[in-house]
Amino acid sequence: IRKVSDEMKEIDKHAYLVMCHNNFNHLCKLLTELDDIRNDIYIHIDKKTSEYSKSSIEKSVKKSKLCFVKRISVEWGGYSQVRAELILLSEATKTYHRYYHLLSGVDFPLKSQDYIHEFFDINGKKEYMSFDLKDDKNKILDRVRYYYFFQDIIGRKEGKFYTACRIIQQRYLIDIQKKMHINRVRNFSEKIYKGAQWFSITHSFACYLVKEKKEIKRLCVYGLCVDEIFVQTIAMNSMYKDRVVDNDMRYIDWKRGGPYTFTDDDFEVLTSTERLFARKFDEKSSGNIIGRLQEYISDHEAHVVK
């Protein structure tokens, strides 16, 4: 693995875009692993969150530039997810970065920073994201053609009020729109694509996403889980489609959970995959897996297979 030279310090940096709202002890461990002179780190902390230590987060980063971006309230499945991503991208693209990696605060790398940088040096000018290729009964299209007016209010919140809003939205508002043949993206000529929220993309495409903010809003506002739609849809209906790789380089287990939270029992599978990152982890239930992964990453440097 090539070492960092003085000439490399100001070029070919990567930007890590981190969205978080809890598990701040784990977040600090994640940031420590990302901390590298070749990286800039941008963090969005949900505005609803108050129980975190900014100083502890700052102490976790000694080599990278660390930036806390403007905070907004983010709700699961709402357009606010997209807004938060665009805030991160808008801030990060003010400076050139070779790649932009969107992570959650409960992710963790499975490879060293030397390995990750070498991987993208070898496989540069590609956009890494995942796709769901089947749209059974138009479930993907349904996310954007109807108005989910309450989604950025209810998210996954519990309580009588939110339950009532959820019932009204799904059983009445959506059913009424279906009967009326509502399609708010009727004039949106591009094909709709869906995949995982997480990505690793080039500076050029990241800037293109920021440039397309108005079009993204037109597609996604009042949509449902549109954070899994906008990047793929913009990419595949643009000049970047031939650069897209159907692989977000994240190891996520949807068979055992939504997604599954890794524990010590998963050490072997996590260290044998070629994926670069994994999610998710929890500081209370993941045991010693993070410490073991840190030791493994430090002790098992390997070249990228070309």
Image: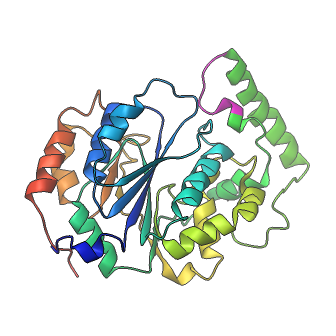
- Total labels: the figure holds 0
User: Is residue 156 rendered magenta in the image?
Assistant: yes
Q: Nearer the viewer, residue 255 or 153?
A: 153
Taking the view exactly as shown, the residue that stands out farthest to the right is 180
x then y, percent, for residue 277: 32, 56
Residue 173 shows up from this direction: yes
Residue 151, image x, y percentages: 70, 37
Please identify the quadrant where the C terminus is shown.
Answer: bottom left
- Quadrant assignment, res 91: bottom right
* Image quarter (top left, top right, bottom left or bottom right) of the N terminus: bottom left
Q: Residue at x 21, y 44 (%)?
A: 266
Residue 39 is situated, as x and y percent measured from the top left of the image, at 35, 60
The vertical placement of 117 against 251, above or below, is below
Residue 27 in view in this figure:
no
Magenta segment's dominant SS is loop
Left or right for 17, reference 280: right
Residue 86 x %, y %: 61, 55
- Outermost residue on the top side: it is 160
Q: Which residues are magenta?
A: 153-159
* Residue drawn at the location 54% of the way across and 36% of the way down: 46
Residue 241 sits in quarter: bottom right
Relative to 18, say whether 155 is above or below. Answer: above
Is 169 a magenta residue? no
Q: Nearer the viewer, residue 13 or 243?
A: 13
Residue at position x 32%, y 78% in the image:
121
